[in-house]
Amino acid sequence: MPDSVLPEEERTQQDDRPDRAFYREPRLVQHVDAQFRERLTELYHQHLGAGDDVLDLMSSWVSHLPDDLDLGRVAGHGMNEEELATNERLTEYFVQDLNAKHMLPLEEATFDAVLCAVSVQYLQRPERVFAEVARVLRPGGVFVVSFSNRMFAQKAIRAWRTASGSGRLGLVEQYFAAVEDFRAPTTVSESPLVPPTQRFLGGPPDPFYAAYARTRK
Ligand SMILES: C[S@@+](CC[C@H](N)C(=O)[O-])C[C@H]1O[C@@H](n2cnc3c(N)ncnc32)[C@H](O)[C@@H]1O
């Protein structure tokens, strides 16, 4: 059901200027720490297969895909062309503001996997975007959503900003449940241990959260 999960006020951003202005300049940086990124790559290894056609939704200059996995088509979507052009894993890419237009310019049932790394918090109409993801996935295809504590708070929706880690996982579970074509998601919630010698170097490590589900066959 479109728009069934969140009341309108929960979709608001603190900075309500169009997203394209916020993402105009490229950010060629890592948004999460190395431990998180390695865990995400491992999760992708578990759920992707050789030759899979993949869509990296809300992507940038990195896709966190395993180096040793030969994939088929790897389509990237994001907000900044320069970031996407720098991403060596992509075989193609397109720029689209999903808060302005949620329909993906992609044919139905054309991907084995769709990935959305550390970005779901920016979607104002997540139910519609998840429905689009189910449409472009082949039957039995997987959608992997991951996130941590970090975010551009001014662009995250209110429901996300005001939730805890487990509350955020609950939101993503509800986005999946709003789309009949998805099976029930599996969730992952992990807080990495910090060796005592590293406790005072930098901040705490980024916790790892993910939810993934396959479309019905
Ligand atoms: C924190 S970055 C994460 C990029 C990449 N997935 C990664 O793991 O480094 C957030 C990304 O969300 C995407 N994004 C944010 N707002 C968006 C919007 N309104 N429509 C489409 N994509 C958006 C942009 O591609 C942006 O690069």
Image (cartoon, rainbow, N blue to C red):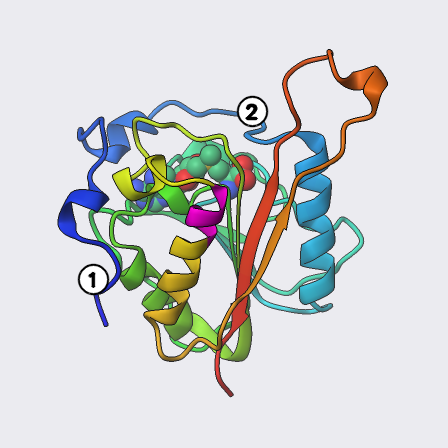
Residue 154 position, x and y percent, is: 30, 26
Secondary structure, mark 1, is loop
Q: Relative to 148, is 111 above or below?
A: below
Residue 3 numbered tag:
1
Residue 92 position, x and y percent, is: 50, 52
Type of amino acid at the residue the image marks with label 2? Val
Please identify, in this view, whether the residue under mark 1 or under mark 2 is nearer the observer. 1
Separation (CA) of disc 1 from disc 2:
33 Å
Quadrant containing the N terminus is bottom left
Ligand 1 within 8 Å of the CB at mark 2? no
Residue 29 numbered tag:
2
The number of numbered discs placed on residues in the rendered structure image is 2
Q: What residue lies at 15% left-to-right and 44% top-to-bottom?
A: 9
In the rendered structure, the answer to whether residue 49 lies left or right of residue 18 reads: right
Seen from the viewer's position, the closer of residues 171 and 53 is 171
Type of amino acid at the residue the image marks with label 1? Asp
Ligand 1 within 8 Å of the CB at mark 1? no
Residue 58 position, x and y percent, is: 43, 46
Query: What residue range appears in magenta?
Result: 165-169
Asked whether 65 falls inside the magenta stretch, the response is: no
Residue 77 position, x and y percent, is: 43, 49
Secondary structure predominantly adopted by residues drawn in magenta: helix
Q: What residue lies at 31% left-to-right and 47% top-to-bottom?
A: 123
Quarter of the render that holds ligand 1? top left
Seen from the viewer's position, the closer of residues 89 and 131 is 131
In the rendered structure, the answer to whether residue 71 lies left or right of residue 9 reads: right
